[in-house]
Image: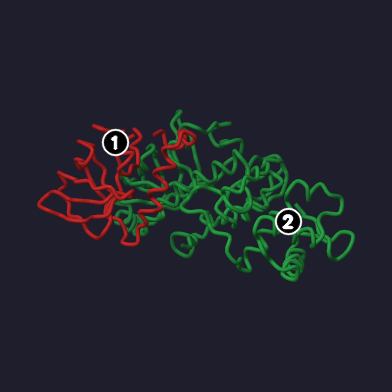
Amino acid sequence: MAYGGYGDGNMNLGASQFGGGGFMASPAPGHDNQYGGGQQKGRNQHNSLRAFTIRHLLKEIASVDDEHYVADGHDISTVTIIGKVTSYQEGPTRVLLQVYDGTGSIEVCSWVDDMDLQAQKRIEWQIGKYVRVYGNLKTFERKRSITAFAVKPITDHNEVTYHFLQSIMQYLHLTKGAPPMGQSGGGATPAVGARTAGGAGAGLPHGGYAVGAPVAAGPAGAGDIHMDLKHLYNQPHALQAPSGLAVEQAHSELRKIGRNYTLQQIIQACEVLAADGVLYSTINDMTYKSCA
Amino acid sequence: MDDPTPRVNFETMQRYHGRKVILCCQINQIDNGQVRVATADKGEVTVVGGTAPYEGRFAEVVGTVLNPNTVQEIEHTNLSDNFSLDMYNELVKLSHKDAYIGLFNT
């Protein structure tokens, strides 16, 4: 099943793409990473989007001040939640919702200028209906709430299941590091956070977490080889080797974990990754190292 | 409505006798106010006391567990016809793991 960007075509915040970024993964301050924007000097703002359960938002997050929050050791900026509307209050310029997802309840404030838009919202955000909220966490008088910039009705309820699974996945990723490459029962220790953040997308489609049956190591598609190589080149031994890994070494290491690519496929994939700026060649055209 | 309401399947439902739960299920039969449903882990439960109509194949029932096979409905939401009970079942199992108690409090 493909879970592409939810909501209408305008709201493509990429939260639902595993490898496509959206949440803060690198802990090193100022360190550029593919999941969020770089840290702005003097401000603790990261442009990241993270999925939460409401209980996690209310109970497990430390606030630096009323506007800045830290979850699992990382700053959070934009959050997304899914829940049922349990109350709806209209004001002159805003709508106040109470949203409950089974783990907790939170107030959501949505500023709506246009009266016509407000009428439409009245229909879409009915009590008892599931909605997805994108917004920022705020605290006022010790009470946490979300100031939403988008509230979308849910039409496919698999999105609800998916959101909770994504909340778990992101929590695990940020607290325990990227999942091991290959089978979920592969036995490889999950790599430490920052360095392999770039390779996190590689591990995930191969069943790092216990969501349904682990993906079988069948013949890999074109997309998989790039992710496998990215992950391999971000392993500690590859990062620490002065010249990186030769393509033959990459070939034999991938074969050991059941990825039976040909050497030619690996050479071509490395060239593509080098052109994309993920790898760079070192002592010769057949030896690469990760740019991360 | 602030207290956590656990999402359950047939197996986990047994831990919450007398408590409110969220049960996503497939509708098998509707008989005069009683609805026979299949849970995400293929258990059979009867939902009693609902008033609003059930539409489609799947529903999310919020209700109180009366006994191992019966839930007293408080409210329900009709779910889309492509709802995956298998994926939901995996979510239920994960949400009951101790490691994620901070996320779900089940």
Give x and y (percent) for residue A234. 73, 51
Badge count: 2
Circle 1/circle 2 CB separation < 8 Å: no
Residue A128 visible in the snapshot: no
| SS of the residue under disc 2 | helix
What color was chain A assigned in the picture?
green
Q: Which residue is disc 2 drawn over?
A: A253
- Mark 2 residue crowding within 10 angstroms, few (<14) / some (14–19) / many (20+): some
Disc marking residue B26: none
Dividing the picture into quarters, in which one does residue B71 lie? Answer: top left
Numbered badge on residue B14: 1
Residue type at tag 1 = Gln
Position of A63 compared to B5: left or right?
right
Q: Is label 1 on the same chain as label 2? A: no
Q: Is residue A274 left or right of residue A260?
A: right
Q: How is the image coloured?
A: by chain
Outermost residue on the top side: it is: A142
Give the left or right position of residue B18, taking residue A30 as reference: left
Q: Nearer the viewer, mark 1 or mark 2?
A: 2
**Vertical relation: A112 (above or below) A262:** above
Name the secondary structure under disc 1: helix
Residue sitting at x 57%, y 64% = A218
Q: Is residue A140 above or below residue A155?
A: above
The kind of residue on which mark 2 rests is Glu
Nearest the viewer among B55 and A265 is A265
Q: How many other residues sit within 10 Å of disc 1, few (<14), some (14-19) or many (≥20)?
A: some
The picture quadrant where one finds residue B6 is top left
Q: Residue A60: x, y in percent?
A: 50, 32
Colour-to-chain, red: B
Residue B103 image position (x, y, % from top left): 46, 37
